[in-house]
Amino acid sequence: MIVGYHIIFGMYGFWLPNDPRASWSDFVGSWDLFRYGPATKTTERRSLANRAHDHALRKAAKKALKYPAVVLNGQQARAVALGFAAYFSTSDCPVWACAILPDHVHLVVGRPDMDVEQLAIQLKGAATESLKEASLHPFGDIKDHRGRTPKCFARGEWKVFLDPPDVPRAVTYVEDNPDKEGKPRQRWTFVVPYEG
C-alpha cells in the first residue's frame, strides 16, 4: 500500500537530458546542447548518480546551457525552505524528511491529495516565490524573450513510491544526504516524524 513518496527535483542545469550517466528524457530540446549527444533515455528507476561517466563531457554540455547551471547558496536554500514551510502550513500532506542541496532537493512526503507531479510543481512555485520575495532568485536580474524571469528549477521530478516499510529507509537516506556533500545535517520546522 503506497503511503508516500520520495521526491527529487533538480535546479536548472542539474541533470541534463543527454547526461552521460543516462537520463529519463526522450529528447534534447536545445540544438547547442544536442551537439553533446542525443537524449540518454533509460528506464532505470534507481539513482544513476554514482555511475562512471565522462566528467569533461558533462561539464562541457553544461556550458552550452542558455543560462548558468543553478547552484544555491545557504541563504537561497533557506529561502527555498521558507517557501516549502509556507506551502505545507496550508496542506494536510506530512513531510517526513527534506534536504535542500545546492543543485537538487529531496523530500519524503505522505501521500498527497493530488498527483505527486502536481505537488512537485506547487512546491517549486512556492520556493520560487520565496526566492523572489527575498531578492535571492538566481536569475533575478535576467529576463527571457517574454520579459519573464527564467525558471531556476528544472522541469519534472523523480519519484519513488513508498510502502510503509520503505519510509524509514527513505527518511534516513534523505537525512544523510547533506553529509555526503560535506554539508551539515538539516532540520526544518515543517518536517515531522514518521509514525508508521
Image: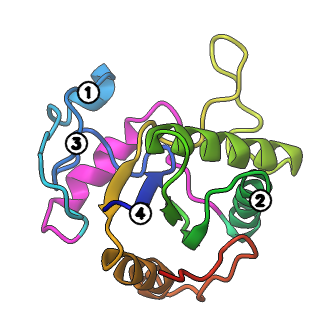
The answer for how far apart the CA atoms under marks 4 and 2 are is 28 Å
Q: Nearer the viewer, mark 1 or mark 2?
A: 2
Q: Quadrant of residue 145?
A: top right
49 shown above or below 124: below
Q: Earlier in the sequence, mark 4 or mark 2?
A: 4
Residue at the spot of label 1:
28
Q: Residue at x 67, y 83 (%)?
A: 187
The question of residue 71 being in magenta is answered with yes
Label 4: which secondary element = loop
Residue linked to disc 3: 24
Q: Earlier in the sequence, mark 2 or mark 3?
A: 3
Q: Which residue is mark 2?
A: 79
Q: Position of residue 81 (x, y in %)?
A: 71, 63
Please name the residue that numbered disc 4 is placed on.
Answer: 3
Q: Which residue sits at x=67%, y=66%?
A: 73
Q: Secondary structure at mark 2?
A: helix
Tag 4 or tag 1, which sits nearer the N-term?
Answer: 4
At label 4, which amino acid type do we have?
Answer: Val
Viewer-nearest residue: 20 or 85 = 85
